[in-house]
Image (cartoon, rainbow, N blue to C red):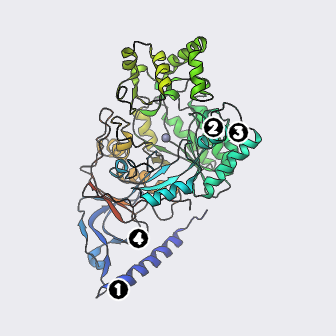
Amino acid sequence: MRKINDRQILAIVVAFLTVACDSADDQKDGGEISVQHLLLGGYVIDGSGGAPYAADLGINDGRIAFIGNATTANVRSDDEIDVNGLWITPGFIDAHSHAELDKDYGRDALPYLYQGITTVVLGADGEGSSNVAERMELWRTNGIGTNGILYVGHGNVRSEVMGAADRAPTGDEMAAMQALVRKGMDEGAFGLSTGLFYVPGTYASTEEVITLAKTAAEYAGAIYDTHDRDLGAVYKGVGYDASVKEGIRITEESGLRGIFSHYNLQGAHNYGRADIGAKYINDARARGVDIWAAQHPYTATQSNLRSYTVPDWAAAGGQDAMIERFDDPELSADIADATNAMLQIRGGADKIMFVDPQPNLNGKTLAEVSRERELAPALAVQQILRENNKVVMNLELYDDDNTRLLAEEAWMMTCTDGRTPRPDQPITHPRTYGSFAKKMRMLVFDSGTLSAEFVIRSYSGLAADFFRMPDRGYLREGYFADLVVLDPEKYRDLATYESPREFSVGAVHVVVNGTFAIRNENATGALSGQPLTRP
Ligand SMILES: [Zn+2]
């Protein structure tokens, strides 16, 4: 892993400025430095968490060419933009995302850009394909709105080798999975992700994951991103505490650098326990485990109906095997019992809301659908799953106070965990559109719990440190010009559970690799994102 130190950064900056000044001298007389874009009179929050300061910022050839007083430094531009009273911050890094950069409707990444996000981290929850190079080549060909980072996913690799089998891999199967992990890492993946809550990840033992994590750890600096086995709301699950310990153990024994996705505690029985969640990570860090986390600020989760309402054993072998079990009256009754218990843990059928493209379900709760179909909720679930699995939100599973407390930790990054909705999907989780603006509103504007520079750091510099991006995440001369100009008076999330597809407002300008993706609060249509490979 190439980790550059401050002296090397300084050397890069000096070298860059020398180039910038040389090329400028060719164009202008009198030592005037010319840049493509010049932001004048901003309030710079640079991603370090340090005190903000007033400065002008110049952009040239995709990089931050200048930060300082443009007048005294004699920096000029044909495109000078007054940003007086506005914040200039690094572009935000969505540390755990499901943005659909691969799709026609998702490539522009607008829900993310309007929050100020300029980089999304994908392939999370075990879903990333090992075909990393192929996917990135398509991104380059088609263009993408934000930068993209990929993980290779344990769930994807496992299903490629073993389908949805509920058993340990054979030696040959393990070797085949390891080969796929190496392929993804060779092609630039940042690490291995798991979704131990999901099929098929849930069928894997801790030891299986450690073996594959050690394979990823053959690559210096590689990351382990985990969706925990049980955040607290899993029927007959291992429980929140054991689940966090498992994530720490995998990180520690593999030697990877770990990040807990959307780190929080699910279920009313876990409200008020955030200090324990924080302590697990702080204790592990104190003994040298390189473990971090990311969060979003919503109380709802979004996933698939099957995972929330049907026990894993009933899903083993895939859809056809599951329907065979539904057809067996005894098994169907057993599954219905489990479904009732699972619904109780999740707050009841009126706390499960469909956010699926299917119009006759969309926006309705499971309780409503069950009444319409004149079936008990547990049997309505089986009927719906026969048609196919549906996307649902589980409302009110997280506690705001837990979220607030965890936000104070120095290792807590920010994520949307958002999935870009299809055009025909009016209802979705608002986190796709609002996570970063909402966290700022909750913690800085409304409550004053945290400083703007601390929260901005959790959006930018902190994540850049974790992902070891040598030249992003901070406002520094020579760094890539991924940046946001925010109006603190206007920056707000507008997406709600009822009306989720509302862009956030107040990101006045958003620049990705030196190109304006949003200018004067309007998308420009630029697709200036780049695939980023492991440094
Ligand atoms: Zn996720």
Q: Which mark is residue 207?
A: 3
Q: Secondary structure at mark 3?
A: helix
Residue drawn at the location 47% of the way across and 78% of the way down: 15
427 sits left or right of 208 in the view = left
Q: Nearer the viewer, mark 4 or mark 3?
A: 3
Vertical arrangement, residue 147 with respect to residue 338, above or below: below
Q: Secondary structure at mark 2?
A: helix
What is the spatial separation of the Cα atoms under label 4 and label 3, in whole angstroms?
45 Å
Amino acid of disc 4: Glu
Q: Position of residue 517 (x, y in %)?
A: 33, 59
Amino acid of disc 2: Glu
In the picture of the structure, the residue carrying the numbered disc 1 is 25
Disc nearer the start of the sequence (1/4): 1
Amino acid of disc 3: Glu
Is the residue at mark 2 in contact range of ligand 1, meaning its CB lies under 8 Å from it? no
Q: How many marks?
A: 4
Disc nearer the start of the sequence (4/3): 3
Cβ atoms at labels 3 and 1 below 8 Å apart = no
Disc nearer the start of the sequence (3/1): 1
Q: Residues within 10 Å of mark 1 (few under 14, many from 20)?
A: some
Q: Which residue is more in the foreground, 486 or 354?
A: 354
Cβ atoms at labels 2 and 3 below 8 Å apart = no
Q: Nearer the viewer, mark 2 or mark 3?
A: 3
Q: Residues within 10 Å of mark 2 (few under 14, many from 20)?
A: some
Q: Which mark is residue 477?
A: 4
Is the residue at mark 1 in contact range of ligand 1, meaning its CB lies under 8 Å from it? no
What is the spatial separation of the Cα atoms under label 3 and label 1, in whole angstroms?
61 Å
Q: Secondary structure at mark 4?
A: loop
